[in-house]
Image (spheres, grey):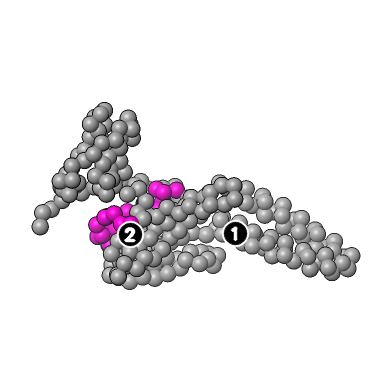
């Protein structure tokens, strides 16, 4: 068996060094991000390449704790946009509470019932706001198990997976299209035995956050980073 070699590639046009994201092994081609030149790569070279992603630095709002047996990655959900959500929640719930108090005092029960839908929406909004300020996602990997815990407020996504069932991690880009715009988030996915796929952590607003989690989990579990279908940036 021939061991893959790490080959340094440079742009044929401007001489700039190419990064792994500039190279498409599937197309046997590369595009330089400096001069935008596109050129083919020999198939024999692609076969001998071991394309490695550059190290992803620790993102903001992340913390990593390591010991001999485990790695623990903590991601705080809070970001500045949570203050806008807080203001909106206060205004919305203040209006609805005033509406309901006035309707009850007038004995207008049809108006009270109509306001219950908006009251429920306000309660959900308040919960989402608290979660944005308080919650964290904690991913812990040992040689035996991978666990995901979200809290302190209850939230879906908690799970446990046996480590020996995991063959690969990858980052996935998720685009949600609305009526007037679209939202892009990133998730960390695991490829399990029999090619079953499982979402480890989702809703990261930036790609480097998901890529960092993928990187740290693969390193701790000694998994080789290889491209898979749907892998972001591959």
Please report contact status of discs 1 and 2: CB closer than 8 Å, yes or no: no
Q: Is residue 96 rendered to the left or right of residue 11? A: right
The residue furthest left is 1
Residues rendered magenta in the picture:
206-229
Q: According to the image, label 2 marks what residue?
A: 169
Q: Is residue 71 magenta?
A: no
Percent x, y for residue 65?
A: 36, 57
> Residue 228: which quarter of the image?
bottom left
Is residue 19 visible in this depiction of the protein? no
Is residue 107 visible in this depiction of the protein? yes
Q: According to the image, label 1 marks what residue?
A: 128
Q: Is residue 233 above or below residue 203?
A: above
Residue at left 32%, top 54%? 215
The residue furthest top is 14
Q: Is residue 138 rendered to the left or right of residue 13? A: right
Badge 1 marks a residue whose secondary structure is helix
> Residue 21: which quarter of the image?
top left
Q: Earlier in the sequence, mark 1 or mark 2?
A: 1
């Amino acid at each position: 068996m021939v061991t893959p070699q790490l080959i340094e590639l440079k742009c044929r046009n401007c001489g700039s060094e190419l990064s792994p994201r500039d190279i498409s092994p599937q197309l046997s081609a590369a595009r330089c991000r400096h001069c935008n030149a596109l050129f083919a790569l020999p198939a024999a070279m692609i076969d001998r390449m071991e394309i490695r992603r550059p190290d992803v630095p620790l993102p903001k709002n992340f913390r990593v704790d390591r010991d001999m047996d485990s790695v623990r990655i903590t991601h705080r959900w809070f970001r500045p946009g949570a203050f806008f959500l807080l203001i909106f929640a206060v205004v919305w719930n203040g209006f609805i509470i005033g509406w309901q108090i006035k309707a009850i005092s007038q004995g207008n029960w049809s108006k009270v019932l109509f306001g219950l839908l908006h009251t429920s929406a306000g309660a959900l909004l308040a919960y989402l706001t608290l979660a944005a300020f308080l919650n964290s996602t904690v991913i812990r990997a040992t040689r035996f198990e991978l666990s995901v815990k979200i809290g302190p407020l209850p939230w879906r996504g908690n799970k446990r997976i046996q480590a020996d069932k995991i063959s690969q991690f990858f980052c996935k880009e998720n685009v949600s299209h609305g009526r007037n715009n679209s939202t892009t988030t990133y998730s960390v996915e695991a490829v399990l035995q029999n090619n079953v796929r499982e979402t480890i952590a989702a809703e990261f607003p930036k790609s480097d956050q998901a890529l960092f989690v993928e990187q740290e989990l693969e390193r701790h579990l000694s998994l080789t980073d290889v491209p898979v279908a749907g892998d972001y940036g591959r």
